[in-house]
Image (spheres, coloured by chain):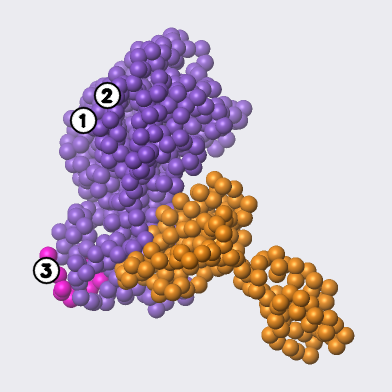
Chain colours: A orange, B purple
């Protein structure tokens, strides 16, 4: 099944490579991987989605912890969580199809962020299913280009998952890590 | 040297840092990108050993680490110097050996421009190091080296590489060792097992009637041999060893069963299959010790004591995991450990021994030929089992494990996880630097020896006393054995045309002796021991002998191939 890991790592060059290399080396397939800053300047947050079973998920988690730059790994697959994907879809638009397209955009609660004589760019945020479904609906009109960010996820509730990382984050890095 | 807060070049800081980490020997090979560091060496009290190939430097550092329990250091230039280290680094990684490799790198301004001798060695070694660093500023030299040592030796040890650009070596900065204290917030090598897990483990031990300890390399790394002995004796539980665990428990101890696995003792593998409790101490259920996982030790509950959490339930599902330093965990268990009612079980294992043919040294045809088993057995007798033996990879490695009975921790050094041919000679040189008083023997095959035999020059130049036993069977013997068993005896690419090893040794100014008959073995070993200089013994052994017993790759552990038509079936030592 699809497992979603939230991985907190040192915000240093090369760390993304270390994480990706580890997952590959242990013969897992990354379905999506996103990385970005957190509210702690020293810490980056990754969302890694991997198709594997329960023991595979445990293996990934324990191997990730062996990376010197990995601060915490949360497997939120079975945790109540909000997960989102963002996509931009450039679709062909003719005077005949344009209004139909705008209706569909409305139905999906997507937004038009660019209008050109022969095309529209539609932006949509939502679950991966919802985005895939919109893409299917737009396909007959002619998709010129599509980009998706991949899943980002966050556990529900008031608990802050970055909380424990704050004091660690105060430490300065010892050296740039490759 | 303890003065800190002085302005120094990056090159000087490298040596200052190494000194403070307790380094006295560095194995290396110079080149352009590391020259600033070599330029500063003369001012420091560190002995540099010039190797003949950078792979040799890494194996020497590895041998040094395994012999001493400390960290070994290897030094090389960028590009080809660094890539030559790859095999040695991977070897150290697989066997959890703490080494620090320092490589020169091209000037930071030209990184990424395919400069002369530029190789992305941190990229190359990413999956085969515990961690690595690219250092581009002199300010980062000391903190990186300090961290490298910490990471290499703590938790589950392993290799760390520090790649330092030429400008970081040449530039200067304030050197302040105190300020360079390691700060890796996320690195947590230490674990403490939960009290409830200790309870569960003790409960399983109490309930067991057929318990068996599987002792691995972790016993040696943790320094837990004494605790293991106390544990086994107090509980009355027999001990089986992995290849890398040999020496962790005295071979002559009544509770020692011997080696497990592919070429382990038949009765050990049988006992594993019949046990009702396995206590895995610092071992990782490698495929060479488990055979077919689906049928492995189906009757046994399993307790795994291991410092690396990622090893738990990796190959074998266990009932209780105690994550932590083995010695600490054993010492906690010892507080409440009671004797187990294992008398019937011990008697049963004794009976299994009688049924085994592994002690087949007596079964070898008495045709005047020299067998490798004879050589190893005589070497063991002559050295009274007290030598530090460093083996290469192949049949001779397994015969050594079967017929040299190791009594002491760190008395066998061998490449287990990676099985790196060419390991023995350089690793032995490193071991000798770590333990100058030890009687060091290399046991190598005629194939593997040729992979790194250039280090004979290092041996000669450094005037090191160690002895070399080449088990010369004219074949890549272990591969020939697989061809014999599994590929219709098609001996493709395994027969060797060898140099005259005696003359070869002599070309390096080293004494060589050729041995063809069993009757000559002990005298030759004795001659080598008496000689103040290194001696190479070229043992011409039976060419098409095989290692028995054998569990074919992936077969059930108790499905062992035995020596055909044994002459005697006996458990008695030859
Ligand atoms: C570097 C390397 N290449 C290939 C192998 C595969 N291999 C394993 S054992 C062996 C034969 C070793 O021959 P030799 O050194 O003569 O020892 P013997 O088995 O004859 O005792 C080979 C080729 C290896 N382990 N390491
Ligand atoms: Mg051979």
Query: In the rendering, at what x and y percent does residue A173 appear?
Result: 33, 70
Q: Residues within 10 Å of mark 3 (few under 14, many from 20)?
A: few
Q: Are marks 3 and 2 in contact (CB under 8 Å)?
A: no
How far, Cα to Cα, is label 1 from label 2? 39 Å
**For the magenta stretch, what is the residue range?**
B1-15
Instruction: Name the residue: 56% across, 47% down.
Output: A54
Q: Residues within 10 Å of mark 2 (few under 14, many from 20)?
A: some
Res. A51 visible in picture: yes
Instruction: For mark 1, give the secondary structure.
Output: helix
Which mark is drawn over residue B234?
A: 2
Q: Quarter holding the C terminus of chain B?
A: top left
Query: In the rendering, at what x and y percent does residue B466 appear?
Result: 24, 38
Instruction: For mark 3, give the secondary structure.
Output: loop
Q: Nearer the viewer, residue B257 or B117?
A: B257
Which comes before the other along the chain, label 3 or label 1?
3
Which mark is drawn over residue B562?
A: none
């Amino acid at each position: 099944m699809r497992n979603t890991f939230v991985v907190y790592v040192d915000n240093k060059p090369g760390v993304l490579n270390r994480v990706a290399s580890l997952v590959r080396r242990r013969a897992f397939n990354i379905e999506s991987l996103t990385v970005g800053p957190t509210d702690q300047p020293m810490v980056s947050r990754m969302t890694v989605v991997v198709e594997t079973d329960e023991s595979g998920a445990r293996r990934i988690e324990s191997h990730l912890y062996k990376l010197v730059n990995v601060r915490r790994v949360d497997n939120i697959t079975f945790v109540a969580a909000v997960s989102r994907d963002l996509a931009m879809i450039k679709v062909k638009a003719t005077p005949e199809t344009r209004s139909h397209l705008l209706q569909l955009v409305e139905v999906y609660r997507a937004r038009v962020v660019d209008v050109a004589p022969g095309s529209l760019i539609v932006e949509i945020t939502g679950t991966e299913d919802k985005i895939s479904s919109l893409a299917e609906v737009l396909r007959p009109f002619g998709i010129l280009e599509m980009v998706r960010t991949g899943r980002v996820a966050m556990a529900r509730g008031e608990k802050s998952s970055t909380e424990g990382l704050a004091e660690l984050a105060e430490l300065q890095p010892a050296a740039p890590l490759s | 040297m303890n003065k800190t807060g002085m302005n120094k070049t990056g090159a000087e800081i490298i040596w200052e840092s190494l000194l403070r980490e307790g380094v006295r020997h560095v194995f290396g090979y110079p080149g352009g990108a590391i020259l600033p560091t070599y330029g500063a060496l003369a001012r420091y009290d560190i002995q540099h050993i010039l190797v003949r190939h950078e792979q040799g430097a890494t194996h020497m550092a590895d041998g040094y680490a395994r012999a001493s329990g400390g960290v070994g250091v290897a030094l090389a230039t960028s590009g080809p110097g660094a890539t030559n280290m790859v095999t040695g680094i991977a070897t150290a990684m697989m066997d959890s050996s703490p080494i620090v490799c320092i490589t020169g790198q091209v000037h930071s301004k030209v990184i990424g421009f395919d400069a002369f001798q530029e190789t992305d060695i941190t990229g190359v070694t990413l999956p085969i190091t515990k961690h690595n660093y690219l250092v581009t500023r002199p300010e980062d030299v000391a903190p990186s080296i300090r961290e490298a040592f910490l990471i290499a030796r703590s938790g589950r040890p392993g290799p760390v590489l520090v790649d330092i650009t030429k400008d970081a070596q040449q530039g200067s900065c304030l050197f302040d060792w105190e300020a360079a204290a390691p700060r890796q917030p996320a690195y947590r090598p230490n674990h403490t097992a939960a009290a409830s897990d200790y309870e569960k483990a003790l409960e399983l031990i109490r309930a067991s009637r057929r318990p068996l300890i599987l002792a691995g390399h972790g016993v040696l790394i943790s320094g837990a041999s004494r605790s293991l002995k106390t544990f086994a004796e107090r509980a009355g539980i027999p001990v089986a060893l992995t290849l890398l665990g040999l020496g962790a428990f005295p071979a002559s101890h009544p509770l020692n069963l011997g080696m497990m696995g592919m070429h382990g003792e038949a009765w050990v593998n049988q006992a594993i299959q019949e046990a009702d409790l396995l206590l895995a101490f610092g071992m990782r259920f490698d495929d060479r010790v488990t055979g077919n996982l689906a049928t492995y030790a189906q009757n046994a509950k399993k307790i795994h004591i291991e410092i690396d959490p990622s090893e738990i339930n990796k190959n074998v599902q266990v009932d209780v995991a105690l994550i932590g330093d083995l010695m600490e965990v054993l010492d906690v268990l010892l507080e409440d450990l009671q004797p187990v009612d294992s008398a019937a079980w011990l008697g049963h294992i004794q009976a299994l021994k009688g049924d085994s043919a592994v002690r087949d040294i007596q079964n070898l045809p008495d045709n005047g030929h020299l067998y490798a088993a004879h050589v190893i057995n005589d070497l063991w007798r002559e050295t009274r089992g007290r030598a530090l033996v460093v083996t290469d990879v192949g049949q001779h490695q397994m015969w050594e494990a079967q017929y040299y009975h190791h009594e002491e921790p760190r008395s066998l050094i061998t490449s287990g996880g990676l099985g790196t041919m060419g390991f023995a000679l350089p690793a032995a040189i490193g071991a000798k630097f770590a333990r100058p008083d030890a009687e060091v023997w290399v046991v190598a095959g005629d194939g593997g020896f040729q992979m790194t035999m250039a280090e004979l020059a290092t041996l000669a130049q450094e005037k090191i006393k160690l002895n070399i036993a080449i088990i010369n069977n004219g074949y890549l013997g272990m591969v020939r054995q697989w061809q014999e068993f599994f590929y219709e005896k098609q001996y493709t690419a395994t027969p060797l045309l060898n140099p005259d090893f005696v003359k070869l040794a002599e070309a390096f100014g080293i004494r060589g002796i050729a041995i063809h008959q069993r009757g000559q073995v002990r005298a030759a070993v004795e001659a080598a021991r008496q000689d103040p200089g290194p001696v190479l013994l070229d043992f011409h052994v039976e060419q098409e002998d095989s290692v028995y017993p054998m569990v074919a790759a992936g077969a059930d552990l108790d499905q062992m191939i035995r020596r055909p038509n044994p002459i005697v079936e006996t458990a008695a030592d030859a």
